Image (tube, helix red, strand yellow):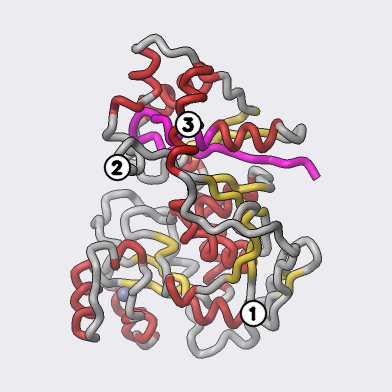
Amino acid sequence: MTVVTRFAPSPTGDLHLGHVYSASFARDRALGCGGRFLIRIEDIDRGRCRAEFVARNLEDLAWLGLTWEEPVLRQSGRMEAYRAALCRLDDLGVVYPCFCTRRQIRDEIARAGGAPHADAADAGALYPGTCRRLDPAQRADRQAGGEPYALRLDARAAASLTGPLTWIDLAAGTRPVDLSRHGDVVIARKDIPTSYHVAVVVDDAAQGVSEVTRGEDLLDSTPVHRLLYCLLGLPVPVWHHHRLCRDAAGRRLAKRDGDTSVRALRRQGLSPASVLALATRAADAAGSNVPSAGGHDGDFGTGSGVLAADGSGRCTPVPSSGGGSGRRSLNSSITVRSHSGTPDR
Ligand SMILES: [Zn+2]
């Protein structure tokens, strides 16, 4: 099978050494075995992404000599594909609208005696399931009343459909999908009619990506993605999470650290080869936080759920029988909304 990898920057700033490492890692993985290297622009968040950075990011990659196969996919033009995926998840009965604001989620967690941290509402890890427990009439009333809502994936309902799942990281080995640490994640935001999780999975499948390479900071997202692959009946890739570049103090590089940007290094007169070498050195010095494992056993997990996996890891989706009491039709309300909604997720 041809190895297909991609580099997927968000055009919210200039590329820095961390991106250089990630892009060259993906390119090398593909070219090392005669595969294909693709680029995707992850610009679903129109409030943060800027067109000028799309051009600047691509220009930096070209300067580095990291040539890619055209066309470059842009997520901002893919909303219809994301909507179709959300409708499919809704048909499976694993989606519910969440009307909560971040404050309400924090308050709810505090009332339950939890210890929320600032990111609780974003990460979804501690979402207490408030809106999962709404009865259908309440839900319909609030939707009909125009109250803004996100869409969440009902993790327990999803897991009961798929049965146990595993995923393969080429560095860390075979890992189980355990959603108890994630809770019901947001799969469509209030302000954007999709989410990172849905967009990445739908697009990696559409681009035929067979090996998803990315920084180990995204390791936590992968079980959610593995579950979505199964629910959406898409061919499952392998993952390869790589080290992150860090500065001398051990901090992860960020776009605000302008002195490690490709632009700044170019201005200092460095060659593309020197910038690539610098990125590798920054990653080597940082080391990895992910425990490695000696290979994998190729077990994708067939599970006992309704969605049975075939030999390729692709699940065969079977809608849950009878619809169940939790079923509701959101199809008419999952529309590509404008971006004028509230920023609460
Ligand atoms: Zn809610």
How far apart marks 1 and 2 lie (CA) works out to 38 Å
Q: Residues within 10 Å of mark 3 (few under 14, many from 20)?
A: some
Q: Residue at x 50, y 81 (%)?
A: 156
Q: Residues within 10 Å of mark 2 (few under 14, many from 20)?
A: few
Which mark is nearer the camera, 3 or 1? 3
Q: Quadrant of the N terminus?
A: top right
The reply, left or right, for residue 285 in relation to residue 206 is left
Could you say which is closer to the camera, residue 202 or residue 300? 300
Which mark is nearer the camera, 3 or 2? 3
Amino acid type indicated by mark 2: Gly
The response on whether ligand 1 sits within 8 Å of label 1 is no
Q: Quadrant of ligand 1?
A: bottom left
Q: Sequence order check: which comes first, mark 3 or mark 2?
A: 2
The reply, left or right, for residue 36 in relation to residue 151 is right
Give the magenta part as a residue range: 1-23
Dot 1: what SS? loop
Q: Residue at x 37, y 88 (%)?
A: 135
Amino acid type indicated by mark 1: Gly
Q: Quadrant of residue 149?
A: bottom left
The residue singled out by tag 1 in the image is: 163
Residue 246: percent from the left, percent from the top?
38, 39
The residue singled out by tag 2 in the image is: 47
The residue singled out by tag 3 in the image is: 281
Q: Residue at x 67, y 64 (%)?
A: 233
